[in-house]
Image (cartoon, rainbow, N blue to C red):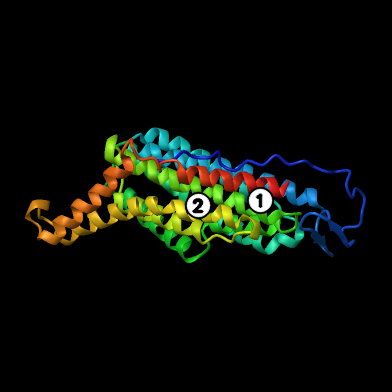
Amino acid sequence: MKKALPIISLIVMMLLSAGCGKDDTAVSVVGGADGTTATVVAGQAEAWEYELYIEEINYSMDKYLTGYYSARYALAYQDTAAAKEYVDSSIEALGELGKTVSPSDLEDVHSKFIDAVGLSKEFDECYIDYLGYIEKGDYNSPEVEALIAELNAIRTKMDEGEKISAAWFNVLSEAFSRLPNGEYKSYSSKLEYLWNDYVVNGELIAGVFYDGASGDLQSLADSCLSTLSSIEDMDVPEQMEPYHNDISEAITMEREFCQAIVDILETFNEYSGLKAEDMPADAQKKIQERQKTIDAYYSEDNIEWDTLYNAVCAAIDYADAQAG
């Protein structure tokens, strides 16, 4: 699959000298004649406060996501002990996020983010207990069944509300909107996260195919398709449109590959219990065609392997340049 980008990490310049000692209710304009300006109105913080807030949130989200994805890899290769360590790291990061304080005008969106953080932390704390039993080979005790029920209940709450990634995007979007040309950094941050999420699921698919990893192929392929759609449907600053169009064009082969996996698995489910050679002719033909798509995707001769990756990198680089 494609290469991952470094998960979002911002270097923030704390411009303490700018506006030091000024009244927070003052009205001023931040920016220059050549770029989008951000108007600071009554109740808004100074620019450096939003930058510091973004840096703090992203630092801990980086730590959380690293633990989350690393735990998924560990579990795919049946390393429960390592998975516990990674989940523990995620819990620590979620605890840090729960203590963050937002600028006063971001309190509403920040509170929703903190609610999502709290549910994720509650889930991971329960999950690490569950992994402790699994590590000992205990899969069916009453304690394990109780933990599974609790995990399902928390998951239902998470599904009914705003998931942590969506709440994070909303926080970033609101904070960046207070900064000059912030829409570009908001775009690049979201694109970077979605791309990394796509790569993780894609690499897990390859692990199932080639490396003996465990995993639900259909769920992984569905997740990839959903992420590709999320990338296509992003809010795109006007100057970014040519770059984003390149991404949308390059997504085609990735989508065909993921859809081929889904189609094969759905066909086998439809004719459950039958070998491929015993299925109706149209089903056999469908499987053969989809398998060709998968084989072509993994072929060393596939010159499109890096096309989407390069388009994503170009878009992020341009957006970051516009954001200054």
Residue position marked by numbered label 2 in the rendering: 247
Query: Residue 57: in sight, yes or no?
Result: no
Query: Residue 282: in sight, yes or no?
Result: yes
**Relative to 112, 20 lies left or right:** right
| Residue at 82 percent of width and 63 percent of height | 43
> Residue 239 occupies which quadrant of the picture?
bottom right
- Which residue is more in the foreground, 254 or 4? 254
Coordinates of residue 103 in the picture (x, y in percent): 75, 56
Coordinates of residue 233 in the picture (x, y in percent): 51, 62
Other-residue count near label 1 (Cα within 10 Å), few / some / many at <14 / 14–19 / ≥20: many
- Which residue is more in the foreground, 287 or 17? 287
- Under mark 2, the amino acid is Ile
**Relative to 12, 109 lies left or right:** left
- Under mark 1, the amino acid is Lys
| Residue at 30 percent of width and 49 percent of height | 216
Q: Is residue 79 above or below residue 230?
A: above
Q: Is residue 306 above or below residue 221?
A: above
**Relative to 123, 113 lies left or right:** right
> Residue 137 occupies which quadrant of the picture?
top left
Other-residue count near label 2 (Cα within 10 Å), few / some / many at <14 / 14–19 / ≥20: many
Coordinates of residue 45 in the picture (x, y in percent): 81, 56
- Quadrant assignment for the N terminus: top left
Q: CA distance from mark 1 to mark 2?
A: 17 Å
Q: Are marks 1 and 2 in contact (CB under 8 Å)?
A: no
> Residue 63 occupies which quadrant of the picture?
top right
| Residue at 87 percent of width and 58 percent of height | 24
* Between discs 1 and 2, the one toward the N terminus: 1
Residue position marked by numbered label 1 in the rendering: 185
- Asked which secondary structure carries label 1, the reply is helix
Coordinates of residue 130 in the picture (x, y in percent): 38, 45
